[in-house]
Each structure stands twice: as C-alpha cells, then as structure tokens.
C-alpha cells in the first residue's frame, strides 16, 4: 500500500486523499470520468479569497486576494489566480453573482501553472451559503 496524497500529473498538482495499492491505480482516462462529474457552467466572475490554512506554505495564511472564476458547478469552482495555491489549501470565498452574495469555503484540490495559475476548488458542504449556491447552479444548469 502506498500513500497517494500528492501526485504530479503533467503540469497539475493533484491532492489525492485515498490509499492506493499501486501507482497504476492513479492512472485514469477522461473516459472513466464521463457521467461522474456534475454539470459545469462556464462562468467568469470575480471571487474574493481569504487563505484560511495553507499547510504547504503557512506564509499564505491570512492572505486575501481577488481571483476570477472560469467555471462553476454544484460542488466546485475552477479559478484563475495571481499565484499558485497548493493543494489542501483551505479558502474562504465571497462571490457576488446577480446581486446575491455567496459565502463559501473550499479546498484546493489541484493547481496548474502553465499559461497562468489556475486551481480547482472543492466546496465545503458546511459553508454558510452552500444550499443557496447549489440551488442557483441547478437553476442555471436547467
């Protein structure tokens, strides 16, 4: 049994919390993901981010920044950032969409540093506005 808590795949740093029997357990094709992923909506909007906890770089703790959403789903966001946010970083998020403020928390699950920094965030279902967020996404996805 090997610990697969951090894997670098191409230019992506992926946080993986499960145990694996072998390295090949981590290799999946995009075809394996079909039907498993919730609908994603391309949605560009400003999001204000507060770094709550960054185990890899504690100097980022209590840092605030503005990011931009690239796409959104019921359980996550893809954002464009000014700096690389390491996987497992916990963030506080404030999004003002259609005059509604959503207060959410999320964890960085992956990050890319190719043509600018991008990160995938998994939203915490215990976030103050998570239910309202899910409802809004369901309405937009139709």
Image (spheres, rainbow, N blue to C red):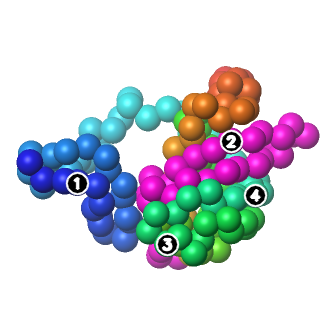
Magenta includes 51?
no
Q: Residues within 10 Å of mark 2 (few under 14, many from 20)?
A: many
27 vs 109, left or right, is left
Dot placed on the residue nearer the N-terminal end, 4 or 3? 4
Q: Secondary structure at mark 3?
A: loop
Q: Which residues are magenta?
A: 87-115
Q: Residues within 10 Å of mark 1 (few under 14, many from 20)?
A: some
91 vs 68, left or right, is left
Percent from the top left, x then y, of residue 66?
A: 74, 65
Marks 1/4: CA–CA distance? 31 Å
Marks 3/1 in contact by CB < 8 Å: the verdict is no
Dot placed on the residue nearer the N-terminal end, 4 or 2? 4
Q: Residues within 10 Å of mark 4 (few under 14, many from 20)?
A: some
Instruction: Identify residue for label 4.
Output: 48
Q: Secondary structure at mark 2?
A: strand
119 vs 32, left or right, is right
**Residue at 67 percent of width and 65 percent of height:** 62
Instruction: Identify residue for label 2.
Output: 104
Marks 4/3: CA–CA distance? 20 Å
Instruction: Identify residue for label 1.
Output: 4
Dot placed on the residue nearer the N-terminal end, 3 or 1? 1
């Amino acid at each position: 049994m090997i610990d697969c808590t951090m894997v670098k795949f191409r230019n992506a740093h992926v946080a993986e919390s499960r145990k694996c029997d072998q390295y090949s357990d981590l290799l999946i094709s995009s075809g394996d993901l079909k039907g498993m992923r919730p609908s994603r909506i391309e949605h560009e909007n400003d999001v204000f981010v507060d770094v709550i906890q960054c185990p890899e770089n504690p100097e980022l703790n209590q840092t605030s920044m503005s990011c931009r959403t690239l796409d959104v789903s019921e359980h996550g966001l893809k954002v464009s950032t000014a700096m690389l946010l390491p996987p497992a970083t916990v963030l506080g998020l404030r999004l003002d969409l259609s005059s509604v403020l959503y207060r959410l928390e999320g964890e960085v699950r992956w990050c890319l540093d190719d043509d600018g920094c991008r990160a995938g965030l998994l939203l915490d279902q215990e976030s103050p506005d998570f239910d309202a967020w899910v409802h809004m996404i369901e309405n937009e996805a139709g």
